[in-house]
Image (cartoon, rainbow, N blue to C red):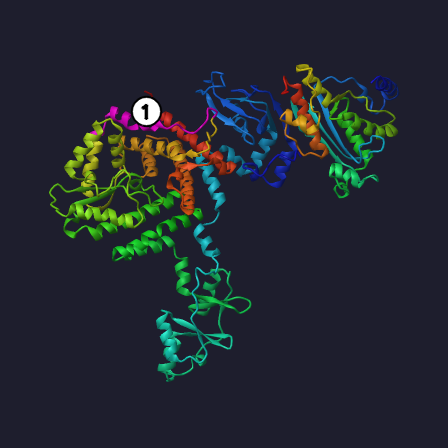
Amino acid sequence: MVLKTIRTVADRWQHGKGEYGHIFEPYVGDECIALDLETTSLDPESADILSIGAVKVRGKKVVTSERLDIKLQKPETLTAESIKIHKIRGIDLHGGEALGDALVELLNFIGNRPIMGYYIDFDIAVLNRHIRPRYGFSLPNKVIELSHLYQQKVQRANPELQPDLHFEKIAEKLSVPIMGRHTAVGDAITTALMYVRTMQGNIPL
Amino acid sequence: MPTSFNTEHAPFNLLTENQKKLLRDSLDIGYFDKKEVILEAGQPSDYVYVILKGDVAETDDHFSGNFEEEDEGFVAHYDNEELFGAITIINGSSRHTFTALEETISYLIPKATFLTLIEQNEDFSAFFKRTLAEKTRHLLSRQSDSDYDSSTFMLAQIDETCMRQPLVLASGSTIKEATQALKDHHADSLLVDRDGQYGMITKTDLLDAVVLKGLTLGSNIADLAHYKLLTVAPGDFLFNALVLMTRHKIERVVVQDEQQRLHGVVELVDVLSFFSNQSHVIGLQIEKASNLKELARAANGLNDLVRSLVSHGVKINFAMDLLAALNARIIGKVFDFLIPEEVRHKVCMLVLGSEGRGEQVLKTDQDNAIILSDDLVWPDRQKVLQQITDTLVSFGYPLCPGNIMVSNPMWVLTETQWKHQLVEWANTTNGEAQMNLAIFADAHVIAGDRGMFKKVRDFMFAHLAGNDVFYSYFASPIMRFSTPLTMFGSIKDSSKGIDIKKGGIFPIVHGIRTMALENRIKATNTFDRINALVEKKVLKKSFAENLSEALGLFVSLRLKQQLKTLAEGSEAEDANHIFISDMTKLDKEFFRDALHVVKDFKSRLSNRYRLER
């Protein structure tokens, strides 16, 4: 956390007046971006991005009409292992976009809004691994971890409870329907719904 | 994406692929807390809402704010996949308030998108702008877009039901043997098997051979036969066989498969009788019947006729009309066979209840009565009338459990006795008398002297005119059974199914009957009565149409159930119980709309006849 702050201050010093300067502006508003990546592995140091899904959350609305659903060209590291995880085969990625174009789209879509997701640190790490060499900065945005938010909310009601933080379990508890599991945009929408639900009043324990 | 938005259901299935894409691309998702007001009365709406998960109540301004109890102000209830807000956008502002009953996640179709779709797609826009009656009509026209008669005509295939077993003789059989075989089998043609090759010989060929060519009776028939046969394959369209026969001016074709195996012979007569309307055939059978036995055969074909009509999607009103007409002819014929010529003009036979209204589709219990002329002397009466009842039972019309039949002297009265009886019933407020009067109110003359019945009926109208107390009592059974709707306006289901007779059919039929009686309407069929009430400006046309559609829907649902129980051979008792779990979503929606029409009608009747006591 402290490291990120120092890093962001340094990045802003360097890029605050640059092409992506607006990303470093403090955010005012009620929107955030629900983000999910599908990747070739679960190791942030080596994972390649297969697809990017992002959707805007505005207040209590999941603005699915404003979303990003990008499939990328097949990376070298697509293995049988990752096909098992994401059920995305090489053929599904045929005709996808080049990573560089996708990142530009993503940066413009996110802007300076907070980024929200489920185990979002992993996604941010993978993104930064690709963004930093290209643009010289890492994502400065505020990050919201859905599972932490949910856990806090549960434990505020009953500190003894240790909630099950599996994706499906949270969705079930919050009675949120799962929309297209294992597609980046589907998971992003589901996460967004869970977030909106968690932010509203009491949640079922 | 979102992928899970289902465009297969009405009304979204009316959209083109491009329009569906536009819809999917502009969808948002909204979350609403329990008890959150989604759309307030008098406010415009920015969206059409399609519930993804949750429960929404529509309430009007009479609503007290208490969702836990049944309340005046509840208008409707929306469940998963149901939509609301469309009418609000069309009308500009919402008439009612929409509140989430539990946490609700809903798709939001932006106003602009919705308006674009409405503008672009006429069917889609019509879906929202139509009343129930129009909706059903639209749906039916989509379901069976072509005339059913011609479609069965075109689609019938050649199978066992329409071909005859061929009569095959070996080569070397004589003309005499062949003639004898044709006579024994009542056939007009036969096939000769000459080393596996079949040849056709008709009666005419044999006649020509003997008379014109002068062959002896011992000649080999194999020499006479025609070996160039016109054939069709099993499974071919029957229509093709007809075309073949017409083109070659022949009266029979042979059915042979690709391996030259013989399956049978299709005769022109068979094709024509298959294509001619089945109901017409039964009608002819009834007319031609010269004794009770032949009549019985015709009567037994009726249930099959109904089944085929319904499976071909014939509208229920037409099926009922047809059946009523055929039933009436059968009973009329029985009357003619059994009642002696000399008393016939002094007797008037009535059918009562559902039969009188012409609303029974399958043969149900006999409900009938007789008016006798005051000066009739007829010693054999009881014996003959008992015979009528017995005959009808043998035709498949079960005995009436309430014993409302001509074999019961209670229901066989002279003209004067009938008038006294009606007055007595009208002045008695107990249930049985009121029910008898209701049954008589549906009476319809089936045979004999119509004049006597007119006098009795007009007397009844006159006697009841202006008697408000009577109508109030008469109408009261309508309120006895509650409409199977929950307090939220959705269908109240139960494990035993929904009793559609008590919940839907009876309130409409009896309510309309009461109004018809009050307004001296002579028609007995409920649909006809509704139309007559519209003409007399007692009912509004739009409401009457909805009422007719609702009744039609209930009756056809019941009929489907009846045919099912008939096929499964279970108790007829089940037929009135409908299981909504078996229905499609759209059917469910219509059923719910129809129940709302019933509820509305009941509350109007309750005001009109002061039934809240």
On the rendered image, what quadrant is the N terminus of chain B found in?
top right
Subunit of label 1: B
x, y percent for residue B399: 28, 43
Residue to which mark 1 is pinned:
B608
Can residue B106 be seen in this snapshot? yes
Lateral position of residue B349 relative to residue A26, left or right: left
Is residue B118 shown above or below A149?
Answer: below
x, y percent for residue B455: 18, 38
Residue closer to the observer: B456 or A145: A145
x, y percent for residue B391: 25, 50
* Residue numbers of the magenta segment: B463-488
Residue occupying the point 42% across, 50% down? B308
On the rendered image, what quadrant is the C terminus of chain B found in?
top left
Residue B476, by quadrant, is top left
x, y percent for residue B299: 32, 52
Secondary-structure class at tag 1: helix
Lateral position of residue B3 relative to residue B69, left or right: right
Lateral position of residue B422 relative to residue B280, left or right: left
Q: Residues within 10 Å of mark 1 (few under 14, many from 20)?
A: few
Q: Is residue B470 magenta?
A: yes
